[in-house]
Amino acid sequence: MEKRFKKSLDSLNSIFQFTDEFATKHNLDPGALFSLNLVVEELFTNIVKYNPENKNDVLIELDKKSHDLIIALTDFDARPFDITQRPTLNLSQYLEERRVGGLGIHLVKQMMDKIEHEYKDRCSKIILTKHLEN
């Protein structure tokens, strides 16, 4: 399934309806749906927040192949933003010692089994894979 969403935080409710529809169609368990929603919300929010001048829609693609959930978000006419290159957070530091930001991406990295980034013709695409138990 795929759908384009207006680059606005107001799109989040429509996005969750889309993910719920996908989860129902593919019989995803509540844990998988939670991971799907958290990852999509975090990445979509970052796209809105860090590329606000670009008003192009964001493409969200969802697929289930065998035991893998595949999630892709494409930001058109964008600067590259490769989350695989973001530094790992040191969670053993006190909050006051940590730099601000990065916790959402850290959670995405922890929840997904594979993360890829493609950048071509000013299209920045993040592809995530989560292995499902059943």
Image: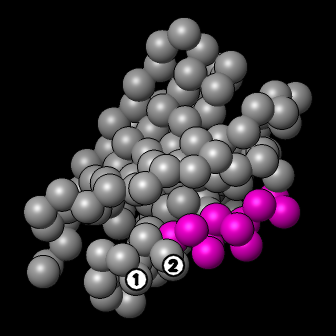
Q: Quadrant of residue 10?
A: bottom right
Relative depth, front residue between 15 and 103:
15
Residue 12 x %, y %: 72, 66
What residue sits right under mark 2 in the picture? 20
What residue sits right under mark 1 in the picture? 24
Q: Is residue 84 above or below residue 67?
A: above
The residue depicted at 25 percent of the width and 49 percent of the height is 114
Main SS class of the magenta portion in the image: helix
Q: Quadrant of residue 48?
A: top right
Residue type, label 1: Thr
Q: Residues within 10 Å of mark 2 (few under 14, many from 20)?
A: some
Mark 2 lies on a secondary structure that is: helix
Residue type, label 2: Asp
Q: Is residue 41 above or below residue 80?
A: below
The residue depicted at 49 percent of the width and 50 percent of the height is 2
For the magenta stretch, what is the residue range?
9-19
Q: Is residue 7 left or right of residue 87?
A: right
